[in-house]
Image (cartoon, helix red, strand yellow):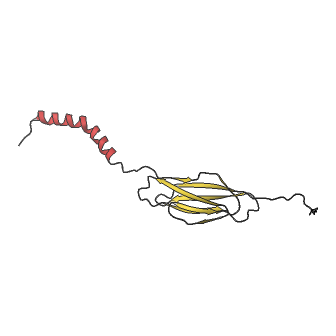
Amino acid sequence: MSIPRGTLVTFFKRFIAIAPLALAILAAGCNNSSPKISVTLSPTSPQNAVGAQVIPVTATLTHDTKAAGVTWSLTGGGALSGQTTTAVTYTAPATIAAAGTATITATSVTDPTETAKLVINLTPISVTLNPSAAQTLEQNG
């Protein structure tokens, strides 16, 4: 069976005309990249804390298709407790002798290159009594 030459020429002209469009559609449909994961914390930085103050922290992840949440880490003074994949509780040191900072980092489990940080300013409290010498009060009556 032979195909007439005119039919083949017409077929190839049409094929060549639509081939770029077909390749563009195919390439767009094959793009498997998903939106990048992002991590945000609440409250936002910076926060201020005095001795033994407690600050609850919540992580929100967008585009985390695995819903794996975050891991938590702390640098500086204080402690983390009650850790879940979306929340943690920070407790400032009981005694803060000098001003400093603590930083809480939330790292995406699904994409460890995505992190969010909360900076906490640790503020010492000082109490000054005035007068500095003891005084005696007399009661009349």
| Closer to the camera in the image, 56 or 40 | 56
- Residue at the spot 7% in from the left edge and 41% down from the top edge: 2
Q: Position of residue 108 (x, y in %)?
A: 50, 58
As drawn, 7 above or below 85: above
Quadrant location, the C terminus: bottom right
Q: Please tell me in which quadrant of the rendered image residue 122 appears.
A: bottom right
State left or right for residue 49 relative to residue 65.
Answer: right
Quadrant location, the N terminus: top left
Q: Residue furthest left?
A: 1
Q: Residue furthest front?
A: 141
Counting every numbered tag in the picture gives 0
State left or right for residue 67 relative to residue 104.
Answer: left
- Residue at the spot 33% in from the left edge and 44% down from the top edge: 28
Q: Position of residue 111 (x, y in %)?
A: 47, 57
As drawn, 37 above or below 85: above
State left or right for residue 47 relative to residue 83.
Answer: right
Q: Position of residue 30 (x, y in %)?
A: 33, 48
| Closer to the camera in the image, 55 or 102 | 55
Q: Position of residue 57 (x, y in %)?
A: 57, 58
Q: Please tell me in which quadrant of the rendered image residue 81 appears.
A: bottom right
